[in-house]
Image (spheres, coloured by chain):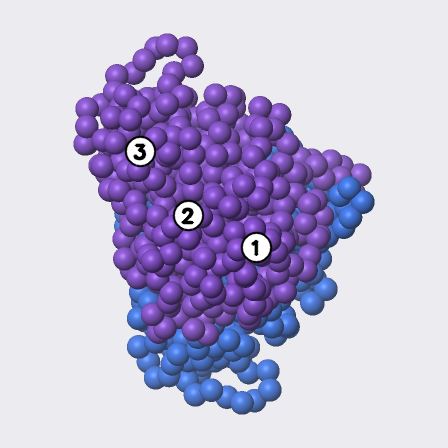
Chain colours: A blue, B purple
């Protein structure tokens, strides 16, 4: 353990929270947001996210500090102490000791391989993704049941678990009337990659642990997150969050901003009619906070759809073109062959009321936010590694990252 | 490889079939049934099922031959050659070579850890079950896509994937009308153990491979299988099938027969209202044959519910009491605390038409079959290991097999 452990505070509303994956894109701003909100935060991370950058020959567009530097800078900037446990959820001895030592009130679980393309590189990456995510979460459930049975698991799922069904997407469950009888059952899943499948497997495993052991859990089916800064990350340059734009870990909006900044056409996969839910990173950290402060009952497996707006890929590209124009940049859209297997024109209407009901006040995607993202891309355009932007991972395995990189 | 490899026959209807897990309770009778039906059969098995018996301190009530002896006896009894590949699906080099060498027309996949209690012993057994089943099947999908993309995967699932919803259970998919729109979606799953969960994970992974790579697959959601002999296993004593009665791998009907034979009360878990689908082992082998002979289209993920009758545990116990009485044995029923977490009184109506539509003529559970099972139990009652019958694996982990065995 790096840094002194914080003492459990009995003050009402103050929780001991483990943030698994607290060195990542969502995990780091969540950890410091929960810390400034008065919780005792312990980051648990294996640092593997940084290793994947090295494997893929890319790195965050923004220069990020080491995790130890981040924690030090946070203490200096805020006066708040975050504890650190460096290790892997697949290492049972480590995880067992960590949960036993800290006896957390809540565990926020971001510690998974989270890129669909990474899981589709080849067999080894598919197997790694499902092994890492599913077994890591299984280990966590056993550690919780053993050492912290009343702890609230806040697990990051993905809207991609649902796929694109031809009916409205509900929040985790659907009321079905069938042959004159009724039941409320888990919403059917049509995940689109071995990564998305791993999250579906997790959801089923966690639901079972809730039903069987009385674990309390919130499954946050998160949309695509955009943005890089939060009020907390702005406090010190060493607190800056990562910004991924590569074909594997980057998302469409970041890629478009970087492409605009370096004068490359914005690459839309296929027709661009693919519609998804999106949210601002500032809403991600707030949603986690809301979930922690409003825990479910023991045995309850609660599912929230965590996004605020729906856009198609084409709409995003158009918005970036417009925002770039106001900065004097002329960006063009280029449709390329879709490396994924997915519907490009489809119905999409996903519910997302439950976090708003708990108090979420969404940040909507604005020209100001796009300006800010574009300015980050422009500021760091000398750091852009050109070869990692175009898609190199094909869902049909016709090309592999190993062959092309 | 043990034994010479058979040559691919171009005769219409003759298939090269890999039977993964062909040394097991369902796999062995399936392998010899497909062999006598004119297919070129290759058994692929790691022999781990026999190791689990050693781990648990139990063994088949019927004395079974080694796999090599079985194959030799089959050649002598039938004139048919079955090839043998001994290895594990987790060993990619092995699996890759086997699928590449044989280029099968169909792969029957029984090669999974199939006991719910085994998966609930402790964390290690839960992790092993999901790792073994999910990653083994993932490896298989990649091997098929690479070497035999037109091959038909016949995968054993379980009726336990569905759990006990309060509506009729359909065969794999359900038509949902919701807010004025319709879609046909995967039937929601409520599996009741880490083992059943592993099969749900497999179903999602295979469905994805069908949608994305055009793999053709049949998922057979099998009920609880009873019976031990088929016309093929009767041909030679060395061909005898296994008969499991222990608390981990045995099923209720076998346990009741053994308990009646040794004068022990029939132990019903809880109220006994738990209702499940059942089928005769002779129907299992016929269902596999029907699936192979009627393959789905490329890209189709076809689901059949493979059982013929529904019974509650209490009904089964009553039937065994009745059948025992006709043999002059007075059996009693004893309700014990349920070591599982499951509904003991529930609605249950599961569809099972599609295999009948293909030509299945079910063997219904009869007094003659119960007589035959009871007679096997009586014949081998000196081999019964008393300490392995009572439940030792608790779903809430209050006791563990390690502590009690």
Please identify the quadrant where the C terminus of chain B is shown. bottom left
Can residue B217 be seen at all in this image of the molecule?
A: no
Which mark is nearer the camera, 2 or 1?
Answer: 1
Q: Which residue is mark 3?
A: B236
Residue name at image x 77 percent, y 41 percent = A179
Q: Earlier in the sequence, mark 2 or mark 3?
A: 3
* B316 in relation to B26, above or below: below
Real-space Cα distance between discs 2 and 1?
16 Å
SS of the residue under disc 2: helix
Q: Position of residue B80 (x, y in %)?
A: 29, 22
The residue shown at (30%, 47%) is: B63
Cβ–Cβ under 8 Å for marks 1 and 3 = no
Host chain of mark 1: B
- Residue B325: image tag: 1
Mark 1 surroundings: few (<14), some (14-19) or many (≥20) residues within 10 A: few
Measure the C-alpha gap from mark 1 to mark 3.
30 Å
**SS assignment at label 1:** helix
Between label 1 and label 3, give the one nearer the viewer: 1
Above or below residue A345? Residue A243 is: below
Q: Nearer the viewer, residue A382 or B83?
A: B83
Where residue A3 sits, quadrant-wise, is bottom left
Residue A235 position (above or below residue B85): below
Chain label for disc 2: B
Q: Which residue appears farthest toward the bottom when viewing the image?
A: A10
Q: Which residue is mark 2?
A: B376
The answer to which quarter of the image holds residue A358 is bottom right
Q: Earlier in the sequence, mark 1 or mark 3?
A: 3
């Amino acid at each position: 353990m790096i840094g002194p452990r914080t003492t459990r505070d009995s003050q009402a509303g103050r929780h001991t929270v483990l943030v698994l994956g607290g060195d990542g894109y969502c995990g780091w701003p969540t950890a410091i947001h929960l810390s400034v909100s008065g919780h005792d935060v312990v980051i648990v991370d294996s640092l593997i996210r940084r290793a994947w950058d090295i494997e893929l020959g890319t790195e965050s567009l923004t220069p990020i500090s080491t995790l130890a530097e981040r924690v030090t800078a946070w203490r200096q900037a805020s006066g708040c102490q975050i504890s650190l446990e460096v290790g892997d959820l697949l290492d049972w001895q480590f995880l067992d000791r960590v949960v036993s030592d800290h006896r957390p009130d809540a565990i926020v679980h971001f510690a998974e391989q989270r890129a669909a393309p990474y899981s589709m590189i080849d067999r080894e990456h598919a197997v790694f993704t499902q092994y890492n995510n599913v077994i890591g979460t299984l280990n966590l459930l056993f550690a919780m049941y053993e050492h912290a049975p009343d702890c609230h698991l806040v697990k990051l799922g993905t809207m991609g678990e649902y796929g694109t069904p031809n009916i409205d997407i509900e929040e985790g469950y659907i009321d079905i009337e069938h042959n004159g009888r009724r039941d409320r059952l888990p919403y059917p899943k049509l995940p689109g990659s071995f990564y998305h499948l791993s999250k579906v497997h997790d959801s089923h495993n966690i639901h079972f642990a809730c039903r069987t052991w009385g674990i309390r859990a919130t499954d946050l089916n998160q949309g695509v997150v955009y943005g890089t800064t939060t009020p907390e990350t702005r406090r010190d340059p060493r607190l800056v969050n990562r910004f991924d734009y590569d074909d594997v870990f980057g998302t469409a909006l970041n890629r478009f901003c970087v492409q605009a900044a370096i004068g490359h056409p914005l690459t839309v996969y296929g027709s661009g009619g693919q519609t998804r839910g999106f949210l601002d990173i500032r809403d991600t950290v707030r949603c986690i906070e809301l979930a922690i402060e409003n825990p479910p009952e023991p045995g309850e497996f609660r599912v929230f759809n965590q996004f605020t707006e729906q856009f198609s890929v084409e709409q995003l590209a158009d918005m970036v073109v417009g925002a770039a124009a106001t900065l004097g940049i002329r960006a063009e859209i280029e449709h390329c062959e879709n490396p994924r297997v997915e519907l490009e024109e489809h119905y999409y209407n996903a519910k997302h009321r439950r976090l708003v009901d708990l108090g979420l006040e969404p940040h909507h995607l604005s020209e100001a936010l796009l300006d800010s993202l574009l300015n980050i891309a422009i500021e760091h355009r000398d750091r852009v590694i050109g070869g990692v932007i175009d898609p190199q991972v094909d869902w049909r395995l016709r090309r592999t990252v190993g062959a092309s990189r």
